[in-house]
Image (tube, rainbow, N blue to C red):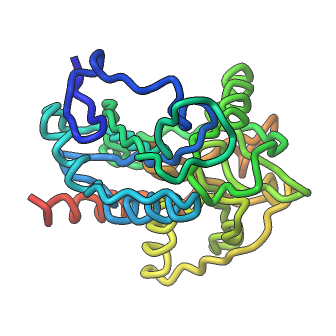
Amino acid sequence: MDIVYLNGQFIAADQAKISVFDRGFLFSDSVYEVIPFYAGEGFQLEQHIKRLKISLAALNISVEDNYTEIVQELVAKNKMTNCSVYLQVTRGADTKRRHSINESLKPTVFACINPIVNNYALAAAEVSGINVIVCEDLRWKRCDIKSTSLLPNILVIEQARQQGAKEALLINDGKVLEGASSNLFLVESNKIITPPSSHAILNGTTSQLVQQVARKQKIAVLHEDISYQRLIAADEVWITSSTRGLLPVLKVDDKFIAGGEKGAVWQKLYVLLAQAQAKLLNETD
């Protein structure tokens, strides 16, 4: 039985209980992070915790917990080498269901783990590209806050699954923004294009790392709007996320990207990201 963390205690998963009046349960009044651990070490852990605190501040939820210590101890107690830690903070449990916020509530802090595969363990030639679909973006207007209100994301991910795709890209007002659980990149004439930061997009930690690595290689990274026509005409299309790494997209809807082959810029960055991860983990040994 996995061990989870709940409000100061590390306990068996089947012993963890929250109130039915917890606002995270009733209203999705909560935020979360998913943090990958490889060889028992958190990958971009500092960036994930920083983003969690930004989300909490946006909801005016104040918690003094040391999240870094919580997730590290949770991984150690479960003795799992490669895993992801799901860390969620809700506004807390009230005594009844009401929309108004009771400022005296004590936030609920919960964390659990799931096994994951090392995204960069394979050679670039062995990585399989994916198919995606494009769907209308029905989410709320503050997607920069990593809220647990994910029903629109769930519905388009299921739509993608039914169509044999691995991700759904979201389009709003003619602009393709990001995936249901990923950030979006494309390549034009060896330049990397990604949508500009806004309230409509989550600032992904892996997205930031990709841009950092690319710039060190003198590869131009531009923040520009991406239309559907620009997307399907691109030389390369990628998605990024903490739990999936950097994945090449070979097909959008029924249209192959550049003949359905993995691109040279993706391959170069994939190798560099694998090296960056290996270096980070070696430094934390």
Q: Residue furthest left?
A: 285
Q: Horizontal and vertical percent for residue 120? A: 34, 48
Q: In this view, does 232 lie above or below 5?
A: below
Question: Which residue occupies the foreground of this view, 19 or 154?
Answer: 19
> On the rendered image, what quadrant is the C terminus found in?
bottom left
Horizontal side of residue 106 vs 102, given as left or right: left
Q: In this view, does 187 lie above or below 169?
A: below
Q: Horizontal and vertical percent for residue 155? A: 72, 28
Q: Residue at x 80, y 45 (%)?
A: 137
Q: Horizontal and vertical percent for residue 84? A: 34, 40
Q: In this view, does 122 lie above or below 146?
A: above
Q: Which residue is drawn at 75% across and 59% down?
A: 234
Question: Which residue occupies the foreground of this view, 29 or 178?
Answer: 29
Can residue 125 be seen here? The reply is no
Q: Which residue is drawn at 81% across and 42% down?
A: 138
> On the rendered image, what quadrant is the N terminus found in?
top left
Question: Which residue occupies the foreground of this view, 173 or 76?
Answer: 76
Question: Which residue occupies the foreground of this view, 13 or 79?
Answer: 13
Q: Is residue 147 above or below residue 188?
A: above
